[in-house]
Amino acid sequence: MTSLRTKVLALGLGLAALAQHQVAFAQAGAQACIAQADVSDAVVYAMPILTKAVQTKCEGTLSSSGFMARKGTAFVAPYLKQQPAAWPGALRMLSQFAGTDKDGAEMMAMFGSLPAETVRPLFDAIIEQKVAEEIKVADCGKIERGVELLAPLPPENVSGLVTFLMDLAKVDNPKICPATN
Protein backbone atom coordinates (compact mmCIF):
# COMPACT_ATOMS: atom_id res chain seq x y z
CA MET A 1 0.00 0.00 0.00
CA THR A 2 2.90 2.32 0.73
CA SER A 3 4.10 1.98 -2.85
CA LEU A 4 0.63 2.80 -4.21
CA ARG A 5 0.31 5.80 -1.88
CA THR A 6 3.73 6.99 -3.01
CA LYS A 7 2.72 6.81 -6.66
CA VAL A 8 -0.58 8.61 -6.02
CA LEU A 9 1.25 11.38 -4.22
CA ALA A 10 3.98 11.60 -6.85
CA LEU A 11 2.42 14.52 -8.69
CA GLY A 12 2.11 16.72 -5.62
CA LEU A 13 5.36 15.65 -4.06
CA GLY A 14 7.19 15.97 -7.36
CA LEU A 15 5.92 19.50 -7.79
CA ALA A 16 7.01 20.45 -4.30
CA ALA A 17 10.42 18.83 -4.64
CA LEU A 18 11.05 20.41 -8.01
CA ALA A 19 10.14 23.82 -6.76
CA GLN A 20 12.50 23.72 -3.81
CA HIS A 21 15.46 26.07 -4.24
CA GLN A 22 14.74 26.59 -7.94
CA VAL A 23 12.81 29.84 -8.06
CA ALA A 24 12.78 32.41 -5.29
CA PHE A 25 11.00 35.68 -4.90
CA ALA A 26 11.37 38.66 -2.58
CA GLN A 27 8.65 38.50 0.02
CA ALA A 28 8.42 38.85 3.77
CA GLY A 29 9.91 36.01 5.82
CA ALA A 30 8.92 32.44 5.10
CA GLN A 31 5.82 31.11 6.79
CA ALA A 32 5.88 28.00 8.92
CA CYS A 33 3.59 26.26 6.44
CA ILE A 34 2.12 26.70 2.97
CA ALA A 35 -1.58 27.43 2.61
CA GLN A 36 -3.54 24.58 1.08
CA ALA A 37 -5.05 26.97 -1.46
CA ASP A 38 -1.54 27.87 -2.68
CA VAL A 39 -0.59 24.21 -3.04
CA SER A 40 -3.78 23.63 -5.02
CA ASP A 41 -3.00 26.63 -7.22
CA ALA A 42 0.50 25.29 -7.81
CA VAL A 43 -0.92 21.94 -8.95
CA VAL A 44 -3.33 23.65 -11.36
CA TYR A 45 -0.59 25.94 -12.65
CA ALA A 46 1.97 23.17 -13.11
CA MET A 47 -0.26 20.49 -14.68
CA PRO A 48 0.25 21.67 -18.30
CA ILE A 49 3.99 21.93 -17.67
CA LEU A 50 4.11 18.46 -16.11
CA THR A 51 2.08 17.01 -18.97
CA LYS A 52 4.39 18.56 -21.56
CA ALA A 53 7.42 17.11 -19.73
CA VAL A 54 5.83 13.66 -19.80
CA GLN A 55 4.98 13.96 -23.49
CA THR A 56 8.52 15.10 -24.31
CA LYS A 57 10.30 12.46 -22.22
CA CYS A 58 7.96 9.65 -23.26
CA GLU A 59 7.86 10.50 -26.96
CA GLY A 60 8.27 7.30 -28.89
CA THR A 61 7.39 5.10 -25.92
CA LEU A 62 3.71 5.87 -25.59
CA SER A 63 1.24 4.41 -28.05
CA SER A 64 0.00 6.66 -30.83
CA SER A 65 -3.48 5.47 -29.87
CA GLY A 66 -2.96 5.98 -26.12
CA PHE A 67 -4.56 8.57 -23.88
CA MET A 68 -1.84 11.21 -24.20
CA ALA A 69 -1.91 11.08 -27.99
CA ARG A 70 -5.69 11.06 -28.23
CA LYS A 71 -6.76 13.29 -25.34
CA GLY A 72 -3.65 14.94 -23.88
CA THR A 73 -4.49 18.34 -25.36
CA ALA A 74 -8.09 18.16 -24.11
CA PHE A 75 -6.84 17.09 -20.67
CA VAL A 76 -4.63 20.18 -20.21
CA ALA A 77 -7.04 22.69 -21.77
CA PRO A 78 -8.95 23.51 -18.56
CA TYR A 79 -5.68 23.80 -16.63
CA LEU A 80 -4.27 26.19 -19.24
CA LYS A 81 -7.40 28.28 -18.93
CA GLN A 82 -6.94 28.51 -15.15
CA GLN A 83 -3.16 29.02 -15.17
CA PRO A 84 -3.25 32.85 -15.01
CA ALA A 85 -5.53 32.82 -11.96
CA ALA A 86 -3.46 30.07 -10.30
CA TRP A 87 -0.12 31.84 -10.84
CA PRO A 88 -0.24 34.06 -7.71
CA GLY A 89 -0.84 31.05 -5.44
CA ALA A 90 1.85 29.02 -7.20
CA LEU A 91 4.21 31.97 -6.79
CA ARG A 92 3.43 32.20 -3.06
CA MET A 93 4.09 28.47 -2.68
CA LEU A 94 7.44 28.75 -4.41
CA SER A 95 8.40 31.80 -2.40
CA GLN A 96 8.23 29.70 0.78
CA PHE A 97 11.41 27.97 -0.32
CA ALA A 98 13.31 31.20 -0.83
CA GLY A 99 16.17 32.38 1.26
CA THR A 100 16.66 29.27 3.37
CA ASP A 101 20.30 29.03 2.31
CA LYS A 102 22.88 31.17 0.51
CA ASP A 103 21.81 30.04 -2.97
CA GLY A 104 18.15 30.67 -2.12
CA ALA A 105 18.94 34.13 -0.81
CA GLU A 106 20.90 34.99 -3.96
CA MET A 107 18.09 33.77 -6.18
CA MET A 108 15.59 35.73 -4.08
CA ALA A 109 17.57 38.89 -4.63
CA MET A 110 17.92 38.27 -8.35
CA PHE A 111 14.32 37.26 -9.08
CA GLY A 112 12.82 39.61 -6.54
CA SER A 113 13.68 42.58 -8.71
CA LEU A 114 11.78 41.16 -11.70
CA PRO A 115 8.04 41.41 -12.31
CA ALA A 116 6.24 38.14 -11.53
CA GLU A 117 5.09 37.79 -15.15
CA THR A 118 8.71 37.98 -16.33
CA VAL A 119 9.64 35.11 -14.04
CA ARG A 120 6.81 32.82 -15.23
CA PRO A 121 8.60 31.52 -18.35
CA LEU A 122 11.70 30.79 -16.26
CA PHE A 123 9.59 28.91 -13.73
CA ASP A 124 7.91 26.93 -16.50
CA ALA A 125 11.22 25.96 -18.10
CA ILE A 126 12.77 24.90 -14.79
CA ILE A 127 9.80 22.73 -13.83
CA GLU A 128 9.57 21.10 -17.25
CA GLN A 129 13.29 20.35 -17.33
CA LYS A 130 13.41 18.98 -13.78
CA VAL A 131 10.32 16.81 -14.24
CA ALA A 132 11.64 15.41 -17.53
CA GLU A 133 14.94 14.56 -15.82
CA GLU A 134 13.12 12.63 -13.08
CA ILE A 135 10.85 10.58 -15.35
CA LYS A 136 12.01 7.06 -15.98
CA VAL A 137 11.07 5.94 -19.49
CA ALA A 138 9.99 2.61 -18.03
CA ASP A 139 7.30 4.49 -16.05
CA CYS A 140 5.80 6.35 -19.03
CA GLY A 141 2.91 3.92 -19.40
CA LYS A 142 2.09 4.12 -15.70
CA ILE A 143 2.18 7.90 -15.78
CA GLU A 144 -0.13 7.93 -18.79
CA ARG A 145 -2.54 5.64 -16.94
CA GLY A 146 -2.48 7.97 -13.92
CA VAL A 147 -3.22 11.01 -16.09
CA GLU A 148 -6.08 9.15 -17.74
CA LEU A 149 -7.53 8.37 -14.29
CA LEU A 150 -7.37 12.07 -13.37
CA ALA A 151 -8.80 13.29 -16.68
CA PRO A 152 -12.51 13.07 -15.82
CA LEU A 153 -12.00 15.28 -12.76
CA PRO A 154 -12.09 19.05 -13.04
CA PRO A 155 -8.83 20.85 -12.16
CA GLU A 156 -10.26 21.99 -8.81
CA ASN A 157 -10.84 18.38 -7.78
CA VAL A 158 -7.43 17.18 -8.97
CA SER A 159 -5.60 19.99 -7.19
CA GLY A 160 -7.74 19.58 -4.08
CA LEU A 161 -7.13 15.83 -4.07
CA VAL A 162 -3.36 16.21 -4.42
CA THR A 163 -3.33 18.82 -1.64
CA PHE A 164 -5.51 16.62 0.57
CA LEU A 165 -3.25 13.60 0.02
CA MET A 166 -0.17 15.66 0.82
CA ASP A 167 -1.84 16.87 4.03
CA LEU A 168 -3.05 13.37 4.92
CA ALA A 169 0.42 11.93 4.33
CA LYS A 170 1.83 14.66 6.58
CA VAL A 171 4.25 15.87 3.93
CA ASP A 172 6.65 18.22 5.66
CA ASN A 173 8.64 19.54 2.71
CA PRO A 174 6.69 21.63 2.04
CA LYS A 175 4.74 21.61 5.27
CA ILE A 176 1.07 22.08 4.44
CA CYS A 177 -1.00 24.32 6.73
CA PRO A 178 -4.04 22.65 8.32
CA ALA A 179 -7.24 22.86 6.33
CA THR A 180 -9.62 25.64 7.23
CA ASN A 181 -13.30 24.95 6.86
Image (cartoon, rainbow, N blue to C red):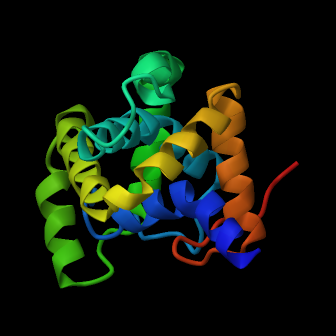
Which quadrant of the structure image shows residue 51? top left
Which quadrant of the structure image shows residue 30? bottom left
1 displayed left or right of 95:
right
Give whichever of 41, 136 is nearer the camera: 136
Residue 11 x %, y %: 52, 54
9 displayed left or right of 49:
right
Give whichever of 142, 2 is nearer the camera: 142
Residue 23 visible: no
Q: Is residue 171 above or below residue 128?
A: below
Count of all numbered marks drawn on residues in the image: 0
Q: Residue furthest right?
A: 181
Residue 142 x %, y %: 52, 51
Give whichever of 81, 93 is nearer the camera: 81
Q: Which residue is located at x 50 percent, y 41 percent? A: 144
Q: Which residue is located at x 17 percent, y 35 percent? A: 118
Give whichever of 21, 154 is nearer the camera: 154
Q: Split into 4 quadrants, where in the image is the N terminus?
A: bottom right
Q: Is residue 108 above or below residue 59?
A: below
Q: Which residue is located at x 42 percent, y 70 percent? A: 29
Q: Is residue 81 above or below residue 47?
A: above
Residue 153 x %, y %: 70, 28
Which quadrant of the structure image shows residue 69? top left
Q: Which residue is located at x 65 percent, y 51 percent? A: 162
Residue 160 x %, y %: 70, 44
